[in-house]
Amino acid sequence: MKKARIGLVAGFTGAGKTTYIRDVLLKDISDEKITILQNEIGKVILQDADSLKYGWKLRQIQEGCLCCGGSRFFLRDLKNILEQDQPDRILIELSGTARLDEVRKLLSQEEITSLIGTIRYDYLLDLTDFEKREMISEIFLHRQLEYADRIICSKVSGCEEEKRKEIIQKIQSLQPFLPIIQEDWYMLTTDQRQKLFEENGSRPVKMGSRRL
């Protein structure tokens, strides 16, 4: 059985996760068998009609946040998808409250790792909302940055240049080796979007005494 690649998209509600999946990751892809799992429904909705048009499957995860009560249902559903659908790639949109450290632990279980190839954890960061989010939940936000593989900035054009530089510098001071995509999505070329989609692999982070 072939091993699917997994891409997770995390971020606070309203950061643009669904739009990022639809307009960046999926925009130019037509030759892969893709399944999308949504654990959060925001203002932008992936339509069943789109899935029929573009050939990918759409599934909703309704049993709660993946890192909380919904984890056992998620593992069951994910294992079934991997074994039955055998997709080339699975894109997972996490809820705004999903903790990346807990999701990493969940996906590091042997029953899952034996079925998958690479995993990538993207974190979407709304630059216009950063200061408010940091003020309300600083520990949570900083921990999300710690366990992400890369940061995808959203709503870049809505943030003043000096403020954007301050935010980027702060992130780099917290996580100096964390890749940060700072361009507005609509400015990305086809090649750049393809590169975002194709880059895979999770950077090593400490999980207690373990490294993933």
Image: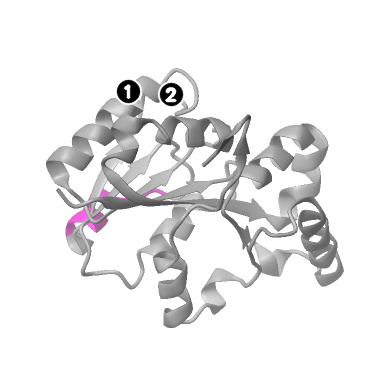
Q: At which x and y percent is residue 138?
A: 78, 36
The magenta segment: 45-52
122 or 107, nearer to the observer: 107
Residue sitting at x 49%, y 27%: 67
Q: Amino acid at mark 2?
A: Gly
Which image quadrant is residue 89 in? Answer: bottom left
Q: At which x and y percent is residue 88?
A: 23, 56
- Which of the marked residues, 2 or 1, is nearer the chain's N terminus? 2
Viewer can see residue 99: no
The disc label shown at residue 73, or none:
1
Residue sitting at x 60%, y 44%: 205
Task: Determine if the magenta segment contains residue 46.
Answer: yes
Which image quadrant is residue 55 in? Answer: bottom left
Instruction: Please indicate whether residue 102 sits to the left or right of residue 61 in the image.
Output: right
Viewer can see residue 135: yes
Residue sitting at x 43%, y 23%: 64
Q: At which x and y percent is residue 15?
A: 59, 50
- Prevalent SS, magenta region: helix
The reply to whether dot 2 and dot 1 touch (C-beta < 8 Å) is yes
